[in-house]
Amino acid sequence: MKSPPRSSSASTPKPGAASDGVGAVGARSASEGDQTEEDRRFLAGVIEALEAATWEWDIKRDRVRINERWASLLGYTPDELHPVTMERFRGLIHPDDVPLVEASIAAHFRGDLANYDCEIRMRHRQGHWVWLQTRGRVLAWGDDGEPCRMFGVHLPIGARKRHEENLRRNEQLLSITGQVAGVGGYELNLLTNKLIWTDQTKQIHGVGQDYEPSVETAIDFYAPQARAIISEAVARALETGEGWDLELPLIRASGERIWVRAQGLTESRDGEVIRVYGAFQDVTERRQLTQALAENNDLLNVTLESIGDAVITTDPSGLVTWMNPVAERLTGTACGDMVGRGVHEVCYLVDESAREPLADLVKPCVAGRTAVSLDRDALLLSRDGSEYAVESKAAPIINGEGEVLGAVMVLYDVTERRRLDNEMRYRARHDSLTGLLNRSELEFMLGQAHEDARHSGCLHALLFLDLDQFKIVNDTCGHSVGDELLVRVVGLFTKGVRGTDTVARLGGDEFAIILHDCPPEEAERLASTICQRVRDFRFVCGEHRFRVSVSIGLVSVHGEWSHPAAIMQAADTACYAAKDAGRDRVRRYHDSDTEIRSQQTRTRWALRIEESLEHDRFVLHGQRIARLRADDPVDRIELLIRMCEEDGELVMPGAFMPAAERFRLMMRIDQWVLGQALALLSAQANDATTEIYVNLSGQSLGDRDFHDSALVALGAVPLNVRQRLILEVTETAVIANLCDARGFLEAVRRAGVRVALDDFGAGMSSYGYLRSLSFDYLKIDGQLVSTMLEDPLSLAVVRSFVDIAGVLDLQVVAEHVQSDEIIGELTRLGVDMAQGFHLHRPEPIQALLAPRVENERASGAA
């Protein structure tokens, strides 16, 4: 910290100048060279009496002398800080405050400031910052006009700083509160003569938010008879620092006359008022009401009788003095009968949950002379037998002399609001359709059952239920009828269990039941009963009569399970093992069960599928489709998916597709393949001779979310790309999702995409649906094609398919072609195209497309 030269305008004592106090001692010392012993004793006595924390800076020698009090403020002793140089002194100061200290000392040395005075933070020995006010002045000057010695004190101001921070926060809170309460504020800075109004104050005056007031215009808003009053109050405040609290008439900018409560406070510095601030509040309504009440006390009763809340007043001992009509209605009593009786007799409040009486509010209100409120949900039990959910507050009635005259108790009828709150909480825990607990609540209850089994050894059971054939009802009669079926079936579930058991809907047609305190044998018996009830049930919808069944997975809940999620997964696995075994049965979970282990294997495959989708570890191969009856430049390729392991090994779809179908991952796989196909076709946008065939699963064909995403993807590419895409759907998938499939297939064909009906003949379904659905290709099932030379029936079926395709103007593709002899017979029958290992074995799609890409490049170069 350098010492700037002192200017000739310095106001601190010059060498040899007379002064008083500490400055006088310093002046003598400078003129005589050293302090006398008497001066030292005098100064030490003053410092000790004041318990001041002092420092003395020998500027020439760069030494700072501190006393014990100074060191203790920072948690040190003087010896621990010795020797103190200005550099070390500076190191204790907060970095942000160092420039302020340097500037202040420089100003003092120049004579711009009579004293050096700063508020700074210094680091305490324990690491935190301590707020100090440091004051000082030069006591001795050298013959060269430079300062030699400076003396100062440190005053702890941490408490004041905390107070200022609290004040700042309180001011912020006050501003927000003012906005809510309709109270405006203002501030007049007398140093700048700047008057500031808050937004609420401007609203009270009826001016816009961009209005800038002045003292003169602010006073002009008051009614003429009030201007002298407010002017006198302001003048008195400036002279004496006394504030004001007045109610005065005011004329808004629109000419409307109102009454305002105007309050003013002052802030002074060094005995001079530097700021005036205060608040405005529109009290027109209150003043009018007060005036009216003064004229006619009956108006108070009318007002209280007209409000929607119950009001009861009491004397200091809690005896009722008055009730308004709402209070009479809620309590089921009459005011005349209740006057003079205890408020607890009139207003009987109980805890809503425990139904236990609640404490009287009036007694603590009167005793504490403060307002009190109920802190629990309360019910008011009326004498007519009604119950009301209420909130209640009580406040003391205190007169001008501070005497407690009694209390006023207000009851707010919140029955409807609490009913809505309870309904919202109920909806958060229950399924909206069936009223059963939902999945999250079931998982919570299962967790409790698991904890109970771990600590008490008690056995419980979990049933995982999945309706069979439910989709048929939905597709045939609509979702509203399907919902009705679910509600009916839930009734069968609840009748088949005990009152202590927990029934929940997990979503769709999946349910779960926790059988509390139930050994496995009893649980299996109850599950079988549920199966039988559903099996015997018939659901009638118009002319349709449906038989539904349920597959149930059963798991014993004991303490050996690691966590509830494992129990849920085991029950789910057992349920699907029951479905795979033929549906309409109960399957109990056993670790050694081969079918359940197979389900668990599919679960692991599902995780691998998820990871492959996440990390893009699927690859595409392609198989060519050859035209039989003419030369054709079009290169037709059917996309075939493979999973790529981390070591590069390829996994055939037969290994993972069952798991994808089981866990409804086919839509995501189909989305991926469709996206890849569009990307491949877009990369060859100028090549009209490549067509790509993409298989769609039955799940995707019946999923409307997939329909939407697929149509969006198709709409994002040009028409010439869509026209070279053929979507393949199987006969069985179309039949199973006929309603949803029809709309989707019509939409993709309108977008320019062609559609092939794959595996035709595998299900031997009716030909009728071919008339209601539009296809471009008919792909004959490979089993029929591969046996047509040995089996006359297969040959006849293939021939009939070709005839049907001719009538419907469809091109025919034969699958699984295995020999030249079959190719010859297919050509004779009039089949258009063929596909199979005999013609082309699948290979990576890049290898199939690479020669064509190279040819395109060569043609472009030429």
Image (cartoon, helix red, strand yellow):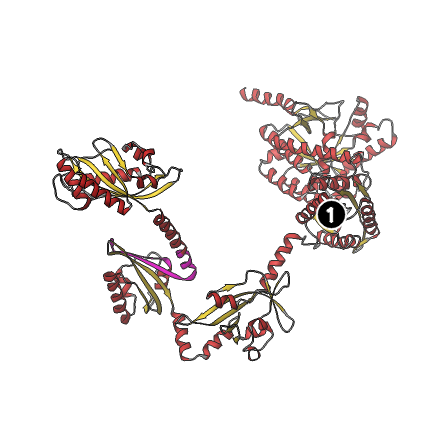
The image quadrant of residue 751 is top right
Left or right: 371 in relation to 741: left
Q: Is residue 685 visible?
A: no
Q: Nearer the viewer, residue 269 or 127?
A: 127
Residue 98 position in % (x across, y down): 30, 37
Residue 89 locus on image (x, y percent): 30, 35
Secondary structure under tag 1 reads: strand
Using the image, determine if residue 210 lies above or below residue 62.
below
Residue found at x 73% / y 49%? 474
In depth, the one of 491 and 592 nearer the eye is 592
Residue annotated with mark 1: 512
Packing grade of label 1 (10 A; few <14, some 14-19, many >=20) is many
Mark 1 residue type:
Ala
Q: Is residue 185 magenta?
A: yes
Whether residue 828 is visible, yes or no, is yes
Q: Is residue 392 magenta?
A: no
Image quarter for residue 60? top left
Q: Is residue 201 left or right of residue 450?
A: left
Q: Position of residue 448 (x, y in %)?
A: 69, 47
Q: How many marks?
A: 1
Q: Is residue 400 left or right of residue 618?
A: left
- Quadrant the N terminus occupies: top left
Image spot of residue 113 (x, y percent): 20, 44
Give the quadrant of the C terminus.
top right
Q: Quadrant of residue 810?
A: top right
Q: Which residues are magenta?
A: 174-199
